[in-house]
Amino acid sequence: MNVRRGNRVGGVTYAGCGVDEKQVPCIHVDAGQGRDVLKHCEQSCDCNAESVMFSKDTQQHVLGLLEECFPASDVAEIIGCSGRSMRRWLRHFEENGTVWRDPRLRNMHGDAAIRNPHLTRAILTLVESKPAAFLHNHVDLLVALRLDYPESDHRYVSAATVYRVLRFHQYSRKKIEQLYAESSIAAQRAFAVLFNEIPLRCVVSVDETHTAGSDMYHRYGRSLRNVACVLRDRDTRPTARTSTMMAVTLTHGVLWSQTVIVGSAQTADDWRLFFQCLHSQMNTYFPGLPWEMQPDACVVLYDNAGIHD
């Protein structure tokens, strides 16, 4: 082994050191002994090293140093890896005798989704050309590409993968919606002109609001006997999260209201159920008929575009 801190020696240069891969031997590792050394690293080792690529020989060399009872903090400083990486390599070695999670795939750092140029290019091209598509649409399209073009590597495609790549390149959900708004200015102007022609009596305005259980105020507190408790505070008891949708018209007032218990947010199924019930209370729109002759409450105005995913 040839180690020089801060220098390049032979093969690969790491954060703060250089290691010659050709001189790194494949050492038999006693996993139990290495595990004892790493127990101290979890508390005492400040191993916040920069994410770099490590070869198989380097990973085995780390396990060899741990077997020889080198302090885990010194090994992390010399190699430039983190204590978490060392614990992961040791755990994989105990499970299957290799430093990989799956010996068949032999996953490397270059296989990560963020470092996959083809996958990254595909995701960024979609979000820039079709910002109206939401997260699951990106995933569905990439999975379809995987089926149509099996020679391309799309095995990492999932909702979490797409979100990770977008976040890594500073594409948040709000930024994607901003891109869509900027790319559809002409359509927005055309919609504004069309909506101004619709009489207000024909419009059914629909909106949704949700209430988290922890945000609801109840009578909660202590008081003297025979004295009513007037203190209102957040109830510590768990309360279901609810979503309320309401349709209001200028001439008929409230046409329909619906409250459902939801998980994290309202879904498209809740919208379909609401609209199915609202449809029976609305009048019918007649295509081609002038707006002056259209019946009241025949057009739905709903501005929550995110629900359509």
Image (cartoon, rainbow, N blue to C red):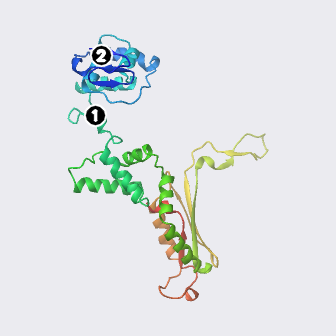
Amino acid type of disc 1? Met
Q: Determine whether, in the image, residue 199 is placed left or right of residue 151.
A: right
Taking the spot 43% from the left edge, 20% from the top edge, the residue there is 42
Secondary structure of the residue carrying numbered label 2: helix
Amino acid type of disc 2? Gly
Where's residue 200, x and y in %?
Answer: 62, 78
Taking the spot 29% from the left edge, 53% from the top edge, the residue there is 143
Question: Cβ–Cβ below 8 Å for labels 1 and 2?
Answer: no
The foreground one among 163 and 16 is: 16
The image shows residue 253, relative to residue 141, as above or below, that is below
**How far separated are the C-alphas under marks 1 and 2?**
25 Å
Q: Earlier in the sequence, mark 1 or mark 2?
A: 2
The image shows residue 149, relative to residue 50, as above or below, that is below
Q: Residue furthest top?
A: 69
Q: Quadrant of the C terminus?
A: bottom left
Q: Which mark is residue 85?
A: none
Secondary structure of the residue carrying numbered label 1: loop
The image shows residue 5, relative to residue 230, as above or below, that is above
Q: Which mark is residue 108?
A: 1
Q: Quadrant of the N terminus?
A: top left
Q: Which residue is mark 2?
A: 32
Where's residue 99, x and y in %?
Answer: 26, 26
Residue 281 in sight here: no
Where's residue 15, x and y in %?
Answer: 38, 24
Residue 273 in sight here: yes
The foreground one among 136 and 252 is: 136
What crowding class fits label 1: few (fewer than 14 Cα within 10 Å), some (14-19), or many (20 or more)?
A: few
User: Between tags 1 and 2, which lies in front?
Assistant: 1
Where's residue 303, x and y in %?
Answer: 54, 65
What crowding class fits label 2: few (fewer than 14 Cα within 10 Å), some (14-19), or many (20 or more)?
A: few
Find residue 84 and report its image quarter: top left
Q: Determine whether, in the image, residue 285 is placed left or right of residue 71.
A: right
